[in-house]
Image: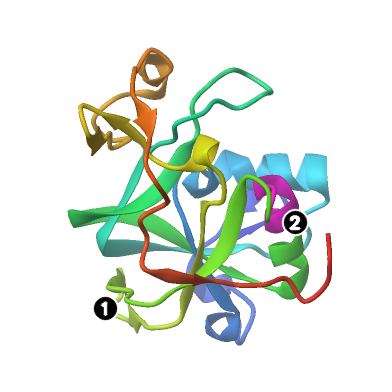
Amino acid sequence: MHVDGAGHPLDAAPGGWRDRMAVLAYGSNANPSKITWLRARLGLEGPVVVAHARCAGLAAVWAAGFRVVDDQRPATLTALPGAEDHAIWFVTPDQLAVLDRCEGRGNRYHLARLTEPDITLDDGTRLTDVHTYVGAAPIRYPLLVDGAPVRTTDVPQADAAALDGVPADGHGVPCEVVTPAFPG
């Protein structure tokens, strides 16, 4: 859990945190420094509860396009064989609104509910209702190099900008896009 600029054990998390919306985080959203950045730049408030998870059938891969702010390739999610470790944010509605702004919901990424999650927390809890952000446009679809996505674990970000390929036809994640309750 992240609060007051520091990390704390999950047993210090507020009661009922497991009842919050579970959001699979990958790429920079799995980095604790991103929480600090979201607090400073986008007004993220309250305890941010994050747990480690093993995710089967999903992979963080490099996106086809670049970020405008730094010309780096961001991560995106797709379905691939195998398993990877990622993070699960247990968010309040206000925290989800901050993530939506950060991810450019409806423009760069869509918020989606995974339809076939195979996600297990470190304590053995299997999650069945998990959301995540998936590419909403070709610049955030997986980059295909020689016809295959490139896992972020295989190529460091410093080298990802030099990858040459084409966007996939879609995000490739088994999910249902969640329509915002309100515009914008």
Type of amino acid at the residue the image marks with label 2:
Val
Name the residue at 63% across, 62% down: 48
The location of residue 124, given as percent across then percent down, is 26, 78
Q: Which residue is mark 2?
A: 98
Q: Which residue is mark 1?
A: 124
Cα distance in 3D space between marks 1 and 2:
29 Å
**Color theme of the render:** rainbow
Q: Is residue 131 above or below residue 73?
A: below
Tag 2's secondary structure? Answer: helix
Q: Is residue 73 above or below residue 111?
A: above
The location of residue 63, given as percent across then percent down, is 44, 35
Few, some or many C-alpha atoms within 10 Å of disc 1 (few <14, some 14-19, many ≥20)? few
Q: Residue furthest left?
A: 82
Tag 1's secondary structure? Answer: loop
Q: Residue furthest front?
A: 169
Region in magenta:
99-105
Work out whether residue 64 can be spotted.
Answer: yes
Name the residue at 44% across, 31% down: 64
Q: Nearer the viewer, residue 40 or 72?
A: 72
> Does the segment drawn in magenta span residue 2?
no
Q: Nearer the viewer, residue 68 or 95?
A: 68
The location of residue 107, given as percent across then percent down, is 68, 48
